[in-house]
Each structure stands twice: as structure tokens, then as C-alpha cells.
Amino acid sequence: MSDELEGRVPAADREAFEALLRKHARAMLQFADFVLHDRSAAEDAVQEAFMMAWKNRAQLRDPNWFGPWLRRIVLRECLRWRRQPFWRMVALPDRVIAPRRDSADHLDIANAVRRLSPRLRAVIFLHYYEDQTLKQVATELDIS
Amino acid sequence: MTQVPDRLKHYAHWRGDGIADAEAQRLVVGTLERLERPPSGGRHWRNAASALGIVALVTGGLVMVQLRQPPHVTQSQPGGTIPDDTVTLSSYLGLQTFGLRNRVLSAPATAWRIANRVQLDVSNRTDCSSTVIRVIDPLTRADLRGPVELPGCFDRIGQQTLVLQDGTVLLYQYQVLPTGATPLGGVRFDWQAGRVTQTYPGLSVDDDVLLAPDGRNLYVAQSIIIRTTSCGEPPCGVPRRDTLRDTVSILDLSTGRSQVLFAAAERTPWSQPLPACSRCPATDALSS
């Protein structure tokens, strides 16, 4: 089912693309939120990544790699978001997002994670949340 | 002592699981809607206009300040006009007090502190099926009472855990279903007995709450986002217009009855309303 669905992307089938986005949306938002540690910025980055994915869908040579391919785009958008010029950072948000508070149990670990670079946060998320091996993480993020 | 990898794993799951699928699906809907729009530089123009507006406001503000300043006024001494007050700040580190005049920032204290050397330790299961609440000494992390397991997930309401007059605390309970997070409302938790003694279905985790001086009532400030859709029920509907309704209510803690004291006029928040759609985007996507 998954492979069949993902195999339809190069045909620019919008229905399949939507289904793929819906399938991966939560994982991408979770990933971006962990990388940026800012829910509002994460939503913006993910939506930009979805747009980029649509525009560049022809670049996806192996449709079965839609997830990792999309994740790289999301990571790129997250890194780009951190380099936004101030006039984009101050653009009015589309909606109010209540920040998720770090619970007492996580305060020190949250503080430590925030001090890491976004790329390292990405590694931590994939390894500890997605249960990927470090080799898989390196492959997925194209890092060594 | 818990090892760092375990704590990282726990933290990653705690943070990741806090994102409901419905939130992510909304981004998909937004993306599809953007794909339907003709390409334009609208967003960049809006951002540029925002930036220009801010520059104009700042410039105007500076000019106004300078115009209003009486001539030949010497700069006041630092702290001369600053009130000698202490404010409580909430950050990801916890709660910190800041002295406005002496500029002293206290060490962060956990927002789960409920009394001197008494703190709640709330561990939600990653699937939100249950929560273990411990009462601990924050310095030694020793249990002050045995752990209690309750169904669903729990969180605070407001910046700090609210301790009610009888010593119980006000918490927020929710469930995570396949369709997303489902709020159950506020609960009064008797941490000494280890049980929920009362529920307040109308309370939300995002509410600002203040205990009335008599301790019997709770003032609740809510900002409710109302979404109107043009294409029927979700997931088909696309937000056409958001409006905020601000209310202040008084909640009788013993009966659970709530009365609205004040309701602000509705207003369109933050952004321009999204354009109305004439057809359902999900249907459009399927038919294209």
C-alpha cells in the first residue's frame, strides 16, 4: 500500500501527493518542532517544506524514499528559518499557538538540547524518537 | 539516577507526542490551499509591509517621545523611576523572579512546586493512556507519598501549578485519541489522598487563571479562536476567517458552575482572513 502510493508521486498525481503529505505530516512537524524548539516556526518551516517538495517532486528518483527526502527538505527549511532576516521573523503569525511548556522533569535536559545545533537536535530526534540507528540517521540526513 | 540517553529518549517522546496529528493535517490543508492560489508575491509584500509598518511605528514613537520630552531635562539616575517591584517570569527553565530595580534574577524554580519542599512529578505515558503522579521533595527527589496512576495525560493550567485553598491543586486532563488530543478539562487533584475530587470540563490548558481572594472562586480568562469554514465539516473545510473571543469568567470551585463576567468584542486576529473557497479543496484535490 505504502509503496504503491509513494510510487505515484513522479506522475505528479496531486491526490497521491496529498496522501503522502498527510501520511508524513505529523512526523515532519514533530521533527521540525524538535529541531527548532519553536512550534510556530516549525509549522512555518514544515509548510514551506511541503511547498518545496511539491515544486521539486520531479527530483525524487526513488519514490519509496519520499519520507527521508521530505525530511531533508524539512531540515533544510528549518536551518533556513534560523537564518531568516528580521522582517520575516516579525511577520504576523496566522494563528495563535500555545507554546508547549517543558515539564519540570525535562527542564535541564530541555536546556541542554536547546544548546545543541539544529543538526545535532535532528540526530537526537531521529535516534531517540524514531529509533533509527546512527548509520540510518547519517544516511537520512546525508551526514557522516 | 536515570542515564542521559534514557532522559533524552523520554524528552524526545514527551515533546514529539505533544503534537497531535490534527495540527499536522492542518498544514497539509494550508499547503493544498496555497497550491490552488495563483502565484503571487503577496506574502513577501505582506512581510515587507509589516516590516515597514514596524519601522514607521518605531520611528514615529521615537519622534513622539522626543517631542514630549521637556527641554533641559537631565537623565535620571538608573533605577530612579523604576518601581521597586519583583515580577515572575516564566521561561523554559521554569519560574524566575526578577527585581526590576536591582535587576536580580533568581534561580529557576519548577512550576510544579506546590509547597515548601513539595513538588509534583507528573509523568505522562507516551501514548497518553495514563499518568503517574508522584509527590516528591525537589531537593532530594525522594517520594513524599506513593505514586498514583491516573487515566489520560495531565498538565498545569497557567504558568504555575495552582494550589487551591484546601491544599488541593488544579490540573488539566486530556486524552490522545487517533483523531488527536481531546481535552477533558480541569480537575481538582487531592495530592495527599492521591485522587481527583472534582472536574471542571470548561477549563482549558491555555486559560489564564487566578484564584479569587476568598479562595472559593476562580477567575478564568480565555481567548477562544473561532474558525468559520466555507466548505463544510473537517477535514474538508478550510478556515475562511478566524475570530478571537476574549472572555473572563468566574468559576465557583465548589459547584463547578461558571458565569461569564466579560466578553470582548470579536475581532479578526493577526492575519488577513483567508480567501473564501467556493469548492471543497479535498474534493478539488481528488478531482484534479
Image: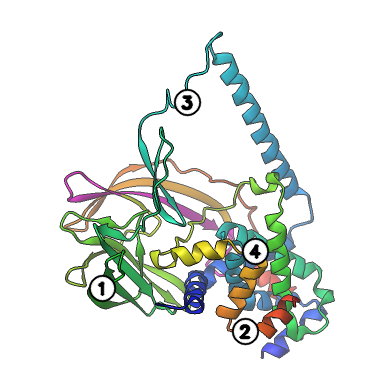
The answer to whether one can see residue B194 in this image is yes
Q: Amino acid at mark 4?
A: Ser
Q: Secondary structure at mark 3?
A: loop
Residue A14 x/y as whole percent: 74, 74
Q: Amino acid at mark 3?
A: Pro
1 and 3 marks on the same chain: yes
Query: Depth check: B139 or B225 in front?
Result: B139
User: Residue A132 has which mark?
Assistant: 2
Q: Residue at label 1? A: B143
Q: How many neighbours does mark 1 have within 10 angstroms: few (below 14), some (14-19), or many (20 or more)?
A: some
Query: Depth check: B41 or A128 in front?
Result: A128
Q: Residue at label 3? A: B78
First to last magenta residue range:
B210-239
2 and 4 marks on the same chain: yes
Mark 2, mark 3: which one is toward the viewer?
3
| Relative vertical location of residue A16 with respect to residue B172 in this rendering, above or below | below
Chain containing mark 4: A
Query: Depth check: B252 or B87 in front?
Result: B87
